[in-house]
Image (cartoon, grey):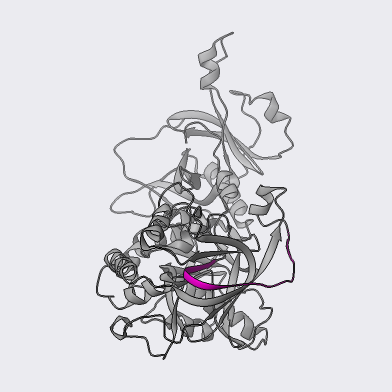
Amino acid sequence: MPRRRRQSRVSAQEGGREEEAPPEVSTLPSAQSQPPQKFQETADPVLLRGIFEIRRGSCDVVLSQRALKWWPIQPERPAGNYKFDLLCKEESLELKNIFSVKLKRRCSAKQPRSGTLLGITLFFCLKKEQNKLKDSTLDLINLSEDHCNVWFRQFKKILAGFSNRPKSLKILLNPQSHKKEATQVYYEKVEPLLKLAGIKTDVTITEYKGHALSLLKECELQGFDGVVCVGGDGSASEVVHALLLRAQKSAGIETDQILTPVRAQLPLGLIPAGSTNILAHSLHGVPHVVTATLHIIMGHIQPVDVCSFSTTGKLLRFGFSAMFGFGGRTLALAEKYRWMSPNQRRDFAVIKALAKLEPEDCEISFLPLNVSQDDPKMRAQGLLNSDCNDQWQMIQGQFLNVSIMAIPCLCSVAPRGLAPNTRINNGSMALIIARNTSRPQFIRHLKRYASIKNQFNFPFVETYTVGEVKVHPRNTTSGYGPEEDKPHEATLENSFPWNVDGDLMEVASEVHVKLHPRLISLYGGSLEEVNDFQVTCNCL
């Protein structure tokens, strides 16, 4: 049995004689080891069988249509030896978790890409703690080039059969995101994995706010399987808006008055490189760059609900969440201090907005939804229809904050989410209203978001499950307060600030928010799908 030589430089690469037709290699069972009877009786057809060294031990390896399985090759089993049974335990790797295969070679300075063949390296996706995914490797060592080529070709054929995985991606990178770290994040963590998976990329670095929007209106996306945004919530929301506008234009729908928008044509991947990363956190369950990248590579796609924001019959934008009142004012103040770091700017704006806490006098109309509670799991997955009673309800008065959210809005300051009772595709929005109350009580409410206590368990807080919302401010003055508190960008007279996915939107009249179920597909796995990532071997 061939052994791995130590103190040698090795690499995994595509090459060797993979284009040649090697001699036929036997795939009959080895006489040295017999797999368990339960595997021989399985309905999963065997494609190849051979001997490889795995973790310095000779193994009988079987490749079927669904999994790679192996057993250590041992002498005849002693009767009643429990420790021996443990050593001979079957280990396996599901093929759906493999995203790349390379030939492993010993490298030298004179021949860096054509050294001695050592075997095959499999790159696969491994589930870790807290919804994180990790890339890992498994080496199959065998010095026979013909033998390895047969297996290498079979693995390549299997990987080519995963048609849902992207082969070419358009990358939009915002270099200004979160201390200007997005460029480093992409080229050090994301691009190497995309190259390893054999995905072609075309990278465009955005130069100003709105650049991605103007770019996606005109650029050719015919040869791409998806779009990837590297940045924060503002960048991601802009790309979502651009992709949906592009879809409406392609369908010949007038964008000023969209009643029933069509779905975006390409899926979108979100690489969290911002300060809060609410969208990526809500999608993946964790704001982890490698996890987001692996979801893209594996082709995991989730349909996600989207909101449209319009006023007087004119579309303003698409988005996932919005805050009016305290949330809008806080963002308007933060925009004035862009020279600060993101965390300093956020904390300063919150303190200043609390110091000048004032309610908004407005009228809120909403269309409630009656969502079945019979099966919470199905409801969370969006598999049950939400019935609308077609009767608008209206409340009016003094409100400190109004939140409208189609996603749970997970983030570091709210680990349970700003709207923990909603999901990314359950066909409903959460309407959360904080009526006028004292400053200490409102601060208590805000602090609850960072704890495990119910942030809605206050007499001045109301929550509704809705399909549409209309917010009509009745103030005669703008929501900014004194003139000196207006951000430099504010140009509209008597306009009211809205926080839409971390972007400032200024509107002087009523805003109509409507939910559109599963309007866009995002690369990401639901928590149930992430939990299915299991490598059944006990040593990987």
Q: Which secondary structure class fits the magenta region best?
A: strand
- Residue sitting at 64 percent across and 56 percent down? 161
| Lateral position of residue 296 relative to residue 118, left or right | right
Q: Position of residue 31 (x, y in %)?
A: 62, 24
View extreme (top): residue: 79
Task: Out of 467 and 212, give the one closest to the viewer.
Answer: 467
Tell me the quarter of the picture where residue 253 sits.
bottom right
| Lateral position of residue 437 relative to residue 218, left or right | left
Assess whether residue 391 is covered by the magenta stretch: yes
Above or below 528: residue 166 = below
Residue 387 appears in the picture as rendered: yes
Assess whether residue 110 is covered by the magenta stretch: no
Q: Position of residue 70 (x, y in %)?
A: 56, 32
Task: Out of 91 and 316, give the one closest to the viewer.
Answer: 316
| Lateral position of residue 184 relative to residue 240, left or right | left
Q: Position of residue 326 (x, y in %)?
A: 41, 70
User: Which residue range is magenta in the image?
Assistant: 385-404
- Residue sitting at 67 percent across and 87 percent down? 252
Task: Out of 461 and 210, give the one closest to the viewer.
Answer: 461
Above or below 262: residue 374 = above
- Residue sitting at 70 percent across and 29 percent down? 40
Above or below 428: residue 112 = above
View extreme (left): residue: 339
The mark tally for this picture is 0
Q: Position of residue 255 (x, y in %)?
A: 61, 87
Residue 515 appears in the picture as rendered: no
